[in-house]
Amino acid sequence: MNLILLAPEEITHDRLARVRDPRRLAHLREVHRARPGDRLTLGVEGGGIGRGELLSLDEHEARFALEEMGQPPPPALPVHLVLALPRPRMLARSLEHVTALGVKRITLLHTRRVEKSYWMSPELAPQKIRTHLVLGLEQARDTRLPEVELAKGFRPFVEDRLPDLLKGRRGLLAHPGMPRACPRGIEDPTLLLVGPEGGFIPWEVERLLEAGCEGIHLGPRILRVETAVTALLSRLF
Ligand code: SAH
């Protein structure tokens, strides 16, 4: 928690912030070892970043006096990430990592090699997803939550959604064995597609290429989804 993210309703009109949830309170005590008088970095969800003086901290509540909160959050990456739905534990970590890296739009996609049971996971509950996004924001000192959408059918996604997503975006399909290497240091708005643990099946690759995506590879090593996503984003942007 390199930044304490405050919901707008946690801030009173006289610039006092009250934090009451057990996760942030425990973090303040155990990791920050915060004491009254300490000045910590705080951010307002969807808004600015600044500092606040800790006025009090006990089991139930931390109170901060906010100073200037006008600093903008770090810039977002110009990417919409389409990620084949990973297994629940990997989903949690992937959401945190990509949020920390600055992704603001995420589509979780069903593909042939995504296990159907993953769609029933409690990790997909909006509140759970939000928790992982918030952890990523706090890690990276960001305040703007990514939007996450679920696409539970591959064919409807390709037919109904993909054409719009590719308007004004460069579609990049990460798939081992594609002829082109992943480009570096691009600035174009991009739609990046990453497959499941078992990879995209050939039929899916054909549909995505047909729709206008460019196939790209990251070299001969097959990486885990969360490593591949991190490597792709850092190399692309
Ligand atoms: N067994 C699968 C690989 C799955 S890895 C196969 O051989 O196709 C999970 C996902 O990470 C892949 O679908 C791809 O999107 C991405 N990925 C991992 N390693 C990659 C590489 N070397 N090049 C391009 N994409 C890669």
Image: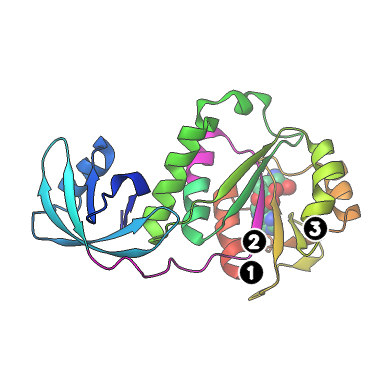
Distance of label 2 from label 1 (alpha carbons): 10 Å
Q: In terms of secondary structure, where does tag 3 sit?
A: loop
Disc 1 residue type (three-letter): Leu
In the image, is 72 to the left or to the right of 63? right
Q: Which residues are magenta?
A: 67-93
Disc 2 residue type (three-letter): Val
Q: In terms of secondary structure, where does tag 1 sit?
A: helix
Assess disc 1: are there few (<14), some (14-19) or many (≥20) residues with their C-alpha within 10 Å of its C-alpha. Answer: some
Assess disc 3: are there few (<14), some (14-19) or many (≥20) residues with their C-alpha within 10 Å of its C-alpha. Answer: some
Q: Nearer the viewer, mark 2 or mark 1?
A: 2
Q: Residue at x 52, y 40 (%)?
A: 90
Tell me the quarter of the image containing the C terminus. Answer: bottom right
Query: Residue 204, percent across and down?
Result: 83, 43
Residue 73 sits inside the magenta stretch: yes
Q: Which residue is mark 1?
A: 236
Give above or below for 98 relative to 182. above
Q: How is the image coloured?
A: rainbow
Disc 3 residue type (three-letter): Leu
Distance of label 2 from label 3 (alpha carbons): 11 Å
Distance of label 1 from label 3 (alpha carbons): 17 Å
In contact (CB < 8 Å): disc 2 and disc 1? yes
Q: Which residue is mark 3?
A: 166
Q: Give the camera-side residue of 209 and 1.
A: 1
Q: Which residue is mark 2?
A: 79
Outermost residue, right side: 210
Query: Residue 126, percent across and down?
Result: 52, 34
Q: In terms of secondary structure, where does tag 2 sit?
A: strand
Q: Nearer the viewer, mark 1 or mark 3?
A: 3
